[in-house]
Image: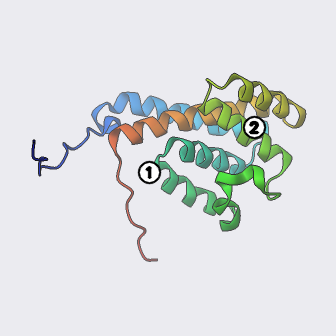
Amino acid sequence: MSIPSQTSPPRRIFIDKQSPKAFHALAQVSEAVRATASEAGLDRTTVELINLRVSQLNGCAYCLAVHTRAALRAGESPQRLGVLSAWRDTGLFTASERAALALAEATTDPVNAVAQTSAYEAAREVLSEDQTSAAIWVAVTINAFNRVSIMSKHPVPPLQDK
């Protein structure tokens, strides 16, 4: 019988710090996507809802902390943030937000072709082509950031008193 090791696991490499040029390029993509979303008419709260829903699905604690604060700053309500993981079961989200959230989920789990087709078709009923494209780009980008933070095990800093 082996005795479990008392040593802590090795610290992860923060890949954003280890490869700053690659991370900077990802940050530039994010800035372009944010501008694209704004130009397409996706408001900041919708963008943050996408960021949060994808981060929930991926289990990225760091991105959840960052984007919860961003959503609140953008005017999102604590009630809607609290029920975001069950958005389909509430009447709190607009048709456009629901379409964007479905696209975000389909982008995060692209293996589910039925859900992907359904989300895309529903989005096309309420979102413009530019908004559909922007919502997918937001989901693609936050998925990339989630992987960076998850693989780096970025810590979630506690909130500081105001």
In terms of sequence position, does the residue under pointer 1 or pointer 2 come before the other? 2
In the rendered view, does 76 fall on the left or right side of 59?
right
Position of residue 6 measured from the top left corner of the image (x, y, whole percent) = 11, 52
> In the image, what residue type sits under mark 2?
Glu
Q: Secondary structure at mark 2?
A: helix
Label 1 and label 2: CA atoms lie apart by 28 Å
Please name the residue that numbered disc 2 is placed on: 39
19 or 76: nearer the viewer: 76
Instruction: Give the number of the mark in front: 1 or 2.
Output: 1
Amino acid type of the residue that numbered disc 1 sits on in the rendered structure: Tyr
Residue that protrudes farthest toward the right in the picture: 125
From the viewer's perspective, tell me whether residue 5 is left or right of residue 94. left
Question: Local crowd at mark 1 within 10 Å, few (<14), some, or many (≥20)?
Answer: some
Residue for badge 1:
62
Q: Residue at image x 65%, y 60%?
A: 81
149 or 10, nearer to the observer: 10
Nearest to the observer: residue 57 or residue 157: 57
Q: Is residue 136 visible?
A: yes
